[in-house]
Structures are given as C-alpha cells and as structure tokens.
Amino acid sequence: MDNNIILEIKNLKKYFNLRSGFLFQKFKGSVKAVDDISFYIKEGETFGLVGESGCGKSTTARVILRLTPPTEGDVIYNGVNLFKLNRKKMLKIRKEIQIIFQDPYASLSPRMTVGDIVGEPLEIHKIGDKKYRLRRVKELLKVVGLNPEHINRYPHEFSGGQRQRIGVARALALTPKLILCDEPVSALDVSVQAQILNLMSDLQKEFNLTYLFIAHDLSVVKHISSRIGVMYLGKIVEVTNSKDLYKNPLHPYTMGLLSAIPIPDPELERKRKRVILKGDVPSPINPPGGCRFHTRCPNAQDICSKEEPVLKDYSKNGKEHLAACFFAGKPI
Amino acid sequence: MGFSGNNKILEVKNLRTYFYTDDGIVKAVDGISFDLMVGETLGIVGETGSGKSVTALSILRLIPQPPGKIVSGEIIFDGRNLLEMGGAELQNFRGNKISMIFQDPMTSLNPVYTISNQIIESIVIHRKLSKKEAIKECLKLLEMVEIPEPERRLNSYPHEFSGGMRQRAMIAMAIANSPGILIADEPTTALDVTIQAQILELIDGLKTKTKSSIIIITHDLGVVAKYAERVMVMYAGRAVEFSTVDNIYYKSYHPYTIGLMNSITRLDEDQKERLKPIKGSPPSLIDLPNGCVFRKRCKYAIDVCKKEYPPLIEIEKNHFVSCHRAGEFLKGSLNRI
C-alpha cells in the first residue's frame, strides 16, 4: 500500500435497525445508510464526498470517528485499524482526527465562552497548564481570523461565518492531521462561504492538513477537493479527480447531478443542454434491487435491476477513475 | 423605470417595511422600487436578511402586524394600489391575481388536511364551482404539476408526499386561479439538486402555459442566470443594482454585485483560482451605518460614501445602480479588482 495514504475505508457498512414495540421489540428491517463503501485519502489532499440528502455522507464521517459504531468494515488510519482500538487508544488517536460540523449555530454550546469552546479539547486531553492553554486559544483565534480579545464572548455575539471560524479553531486546537468537514459551509451565505473556503485552503497549506470534505453542493466540493467520491443511497458510484468528474463523468447519476446544477453564467446557460433526472431518491430502508440508481436512470437496461454493478476501474493514463455502472460513460 | 412600454403588470414604488422590535426598528425593506413586465421572469437575489422575502410578503400584504408595518410606498397592480385595499378586496387579489410559492413545502402545507382538500380550497375561495367540478379542476392541476397518478393522490396527506412532491402540490395551489403574478420565494432551497432542477423546470414550463409573470427570489446565482430575464440585487433592505441578467453578470457596476460574482464557486471553473470573498458580514438592520449601507465591506469606499446614501440611478439604459463610483466603472477609470 502507498505510504502516503492517511486514511483507508474498507467495505464500511452502517445499518440503523428499525424496531417497533416497547418491551419486546421487533426487528423491522434496517436503514442501510452506508452500504459497503471503500475509498482512501492521501496525506495532504482534500477528498470530497458529495451526494444528496440521505445518501450516507455524514454517517460516513461519524462512523470514521466512531461517534456511532460501524456495522461492518474497517477504517485504517496510518496503518492502525480504528475499529479495533480500545477506548483509551481511540481517545489518543482522536487528537489527530477532528471534525467540523455543519451548523455553526447548533454545534457551539451557547453557555460557553469562545475561550472555553476552543480550549475544551486541550483540557480534555490535558495539554499544558492554564496559562499555556490561554495563550494557545488566543493564537488559534488569530489563526482563523478572529480577534483574540473576543475570547470571553459567547457564540450568540458572533455572525454565522465567525461561528464557523470558532468551529474551525476548535478543530485545530489539538494540531490534528486529518479533519472531517461535514457540510462546513452549507449554512452560510455566498460571500461568507467564500471566506471560510479560503481560510480552509490556507490552513491546509500552513499545517499540512488532510481534509475529508463532505457537502451536497458539487461546485463547492469541486472547488476545494483534489479527488471526489459521488455517493448515492449508501453507495459510492464514482471516484475520480475533480477535473475529470466535470469533464468526463462516467456514472449516469454524476451526469444528472452535474446537469441539474445551473452555472452562474447566463449566456452559457442558454446554450447548455440539460438532462433532468426524473423521480425521487428511493428510501434507504428498502432500496431498489440491482443498481440502486436504476429507477431514475435514463440508461437503465434489464441487467440493472437484477445485478448490482461494482466499482470498476476505468483509469486512463494514470488518472484514477472508478465507476459502478454497467454502461459507464454512456451519455444520458 | 425598467423597460419602456405600458405592459407593466406590477410597479413597486419606494416600498418601506419596518419591524418594530424591543431592540429597535428593523428596516427590513428600506425604499425599494421596481417593476415587473407582463410575461417576464424577474430574479431578486441577495443574502440572508437582505429583505427579499419581506419584499414578497409586502406585495401580498402578508406582513404580520405588529411587529411589522409597511411604512410607505405604493404597490400598483392593474392600476390599483394594493396598499390601499381593504380586507375583502384584498382577499380577491391574494391567491387569485397574485399568488406565492413558499420556501418550505414541509411547513407550508397543513398536515391535517389532504393535499386535494387544500388545493380545492384555493380554487373555491375564488370561483363558484360544484364539488365535482372542483375535484376535476384539482385533478387537472395535479396533472399540470406532473404528480404521477393524480387520482390515487387525491386523498393523500402531506406527510405521504416527498419534498419535491409537496412543492409540486404547493405550485398546483399557486397556479389554481391562473394568477397574473407568481412569486416563488426560494422555491427549491429545501430540496436536493436533482429535485430542484425538476421544480424549476416545472415553474418555467408553466409560465408559458399560464402566461404569468414570475418573481423568483433566491440566493442561488446559478438559478437566476438560468431563469431570470432581469435581476434586482438586494443588500441590507435596499436594491443596489437592477438590470438585465446579462448586465448583472457581465457588466456589473455595483461593488456588492461584483463581490458576489467573485465569491461563487463555479462548476465549470478550469483552474482552481482563489475565491475573492467580500470581507466582513452584512450589517445589522437595526443599526445601519450612515451613508452607503455597503461601505464598510466595500473595497472602493471613499469619503462621500460615509455621508450620503447613493440613490439608485439609471446609469445606462435599463441599468440602475446605487453607487457613488458606478460612473467611474462605466467610464473605465476604475477597475474591478
């Protein structure tokens, strides 16, 4: 295996069981939120995970950090299988893997000052004394573009963009190597979104960070990521670099997704031919058999409802390109 | 203002809508004027709190009072000022001549009534129809908004519909009486991209069928580029630029619009260029800076910006800008950075 692979996800599954009844609960099936996905992230890169709501992208991040236990599969971080670690060892590794959450309003405690919020990771991991922590928190606030003098303010005194900066500062506190970013900019307005995206790129260069960047907005993901995985109903359907994903998509779902996003350029939009995917995303409780996308796919044939396509390698000239489709590359 | 000719369907003049709160007066909409042509799609863009939705609610006279109040202005529809209308007359306009598609289809539908019940309600309020005729009309509408198997859906409740289907039902209600104006307030923000595309195509397609004019309110600059013919850019309760979609995207003269265009990530960008965001964040609407509301975030701000609010003036034909330095952009003596 390549030496510079920092995180490898192997056949990861996460099912949420549905039960009914109070005392003698009956098993009523499961939501297959993440269903057998594999991918890897190289050190220093940004891997984007994109898909519509309910496709399992956030669950993936939570399972990696063991915030929720996996059903099956392995997550290898720097050669260590995270699912095999005991609590103590996991806590140690969590220092190196941090997370930034989507909602800067809900992910900061309203009763804690900014100093306490950003300093809490240091306290939990017992790093330095009080004086050191204070100095470090001030330094972190400065790094993310906040005024260190605001250390005693509460989250409600900040705007959405500033709050997300606080979330970033908290994630940076333990000098992590890998940051899982779960929709970090989707709650923000465009002008502020751009500020946070720039900040994240700057920090990545400065501290040699690796990002797993999860979002539903493909243009944001494409902007920040070097490689992208597209998810649909718990499965990864396509993986490639961000340029090829736009220029040469192989999976019909990726094509539909790209086509659905209007480009902020009126002249281009007038010329652009769009294919609109029909129907809704099916429920993950009872996903369609065969290829999960076949119910909405304009290219679907008989085989698509019978067999499940695996992620096949279509790499060309050393450029990685994987897709899970029997008719990969056929335009929709 | 706007395109010449008499085929205006709506004219909003100097509209001010304030909210009186314990913390002070929130000037949500502070003196905006625009017009809408027959058959036109007008886009209103702006960030959270810029006053887009309040503008829409003011047109429909749906501002909760108190704390809100339309302080001044005129909204002329069909030669009549909507702000001077009384209850019964207003009822006749609302949902009939002007109707609205709301942002969140999950909360805008009543969960205890069936979808058809709610659609039929919006029909029979304005038209005298028998129950049978109303159901027939309802089926026709469900078909128009492309809900599959409409007969089977007649007795469904909102929770049995997906997000996209609920929004379709909302659209059916909005077009029930073939309104002259359809206002869509962030119609797809709560939906996934592929569903968003379906809904927007539907609205655009219906426009040709019903010959309505459309006001589409959104923060998504891609959506505006695709569907709008003219665009009004709002910032802190004011219109800062108003022109054709091409002018706004390619020849903008207001620093806020320019900044907005530089902030967006584009799907088709070739090189990864660093984004050029606007610094800071929007001001509080209670405590607006004097002079130009944008000056604190503006790269081009000069002394006069502190003193006077720049009026919205027609700098070129059909291109309205509210900036002291717009003339310099026009002449080319000031470069967009």
Image: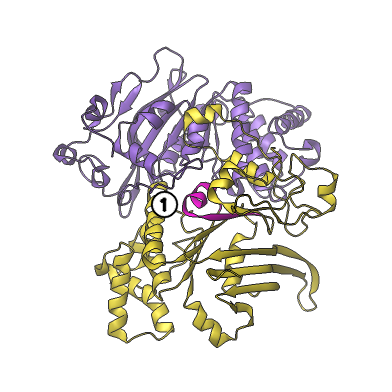
Q: Which picture quadrant has residue B195?
A: top right
Is residue B83 shown above or below B102? above
**Image coords of residue B162 (percent x, y):** 68, 48
Is residue A148 shown above or below B295? below
Q: Is A223 contained in the magenta span?
A: yes
Q: Residues within 10 Å of mark 1 (few under 14, many from 20)?
A: many
Say what amino acid the circle numbered 1 marks: Gln
**Image coords of residue B168 (percent x, y):** 65, 38
Q: Is residue B253 left or right of residue A45?
A: left
Q: Which picture quadrant has residue B173?
A: top right
Is residue A239 shown above or below A180? above
Q: In the depicted view, which residue is nearer to us: B40 or B121?
A: B40
Q: How is the image coloured?
A: by chain
Q: Quadrant of the C terminus of chain A?
A: top right
Furthest residue toward left: B303
Q: Is residue B135 left or right of residue B92?
A: right
Q: In the depicted view, which residue is nearer to us: B297 or A34?
A: A34
Is residue A176 shown above or below B152? below
* Magenta-highlighted residues: A216-231
Q: In the depicted view, which residue is nearer to us: B329 or B282?
A: B329
> Does dot 1 land on a helix, a strand or a loop?
helix
Chain A painted colour: yellow
Q: Is residue A67 visible?
A: no
Residue at 37% from the left image edge and 77% from the top image edge: A119
Residue at 58% from the left image edge and 62% from the top image edge: A58
Residue at 33% from the left image edge and 70% from the top image edge: A140
Q: Which residue is mark 1?
A: A193
